[in-house]
Image (spheres, coloured by chain):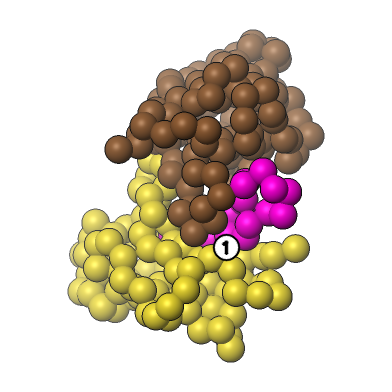
Amino acid sequence: AQSVTQPDIHITVSEGASLELRCNYSYGATPYLFWYVQSPGQGLQLLLKYFSGDTLVQGIKGFEAEFKRSQSSFNLRKPSVHWSDAAEYFCAVGLKENSGAGSYQLTFGKGTKLSVIP
Amino acid sequence: SQTIHQWPATLVQPVGSPLSLECTVEGTSNPNLYWYRQAAGRGLQLLFYSVGIGQISSEVPQNLSASRPQDRQFILSSKKLLLSDSGFYLCAWSPKGYSNYGYTFGSGTRLTVV
């Protein structure tokens, strides 16, 4: 079965500093990859996704992520963090089921909580 | 455009009481629907998913059940709540067959069982 690992439970950065959140997945083929952000008490919002093509994908709020097949990684980056980026970030892997029902499931990592120091 | 509604936003219920959380999707048809629970420090746990009316798959044996009485309505229920049912419950939807679409989440329900 596929799995997603986010090795950092909590990261603290200063406002204006660069950010990289790590995500590694385990699967025999290239899955679809997603990053979501969750502000406190809110649902998850899609930041960006990768499913084919250019391995560097741009998302909302100035985030980008790079898919590295050789490392089975999909790390999220932002060159300059803003205080409003403080939230929890989830990496997810998507695979299509072979049930014929057209359903599929995402497997989520356990999340990385980002704190920003003003 | 598609929207997903989830209510209530907050709920405090006594142990042993029933539960009903509702989720509806607008602007799409025949979606896949999902219920997740998020406990502190434990990430997202998939509870149920549904590919159509009356079709429910349970991922985790527990005190909860789900139903899909209409195409775009997904309900999470319990007959008797336990303290361990406390958490943040999220509903999500995805279109059929488009694995690269991902999920769209509702704003969640904070359930506290006292």
Vertical placement of residue B90 versus A88, above or below: above
Residue A43, percent across and down?
41, 42
Q: Is residue A75 left or right of residue B79?
A: left
Q: Give the image location of residue A90, x and y in percent.
A: 48, 59
Q: Amino acid at mark 1?
A: Val
Say whether residue A110 is visible: no
Q: From the rendered image, report the letter of the chain displayed in yellow.
A: A
The percent position of residue A58, horizontal first and vertical second, equals: 31, 71
Residue designated by label 1? A93
Residue A73 at what x, y percent from top left?
A: 54, 78
Q: Which residues are magenta?
A: A89-112
Residue reaching furthest to the right:
B61
Q: Is residue A117 magenta?
A: no
- Identity of the residue drawn at 37% across and 68% down: A12
Q: What secondary structure is found at the residue carrying circle 1?
A: strand
On screen, B75 above or below B36?
Answer: above
* Residue at left offset 67%, top offset 23%: B54
The quadrant in which residue A65 appears is bottom left
In the displayed structure image, the side of residue B55 where residue B31 appears, left or right: left
Question: Quadrant of the image for the C terminus of chain B?
Answer: top right
Residue B27 in sight from this viewpoint? yes
Chain B display color: brown
Of the pair A8 and A58, the residue shown nearer to us: A58
Q: Seen from this angle, which residue lies furthest top?
A: B17
Q: Nearer the viewer, residue A109 or A87?
A: A109
User: Exactly how many numbered labels are in the figure?
Assistant: 1
Q: Residue at x 67, y 43 (%)?
A: A101
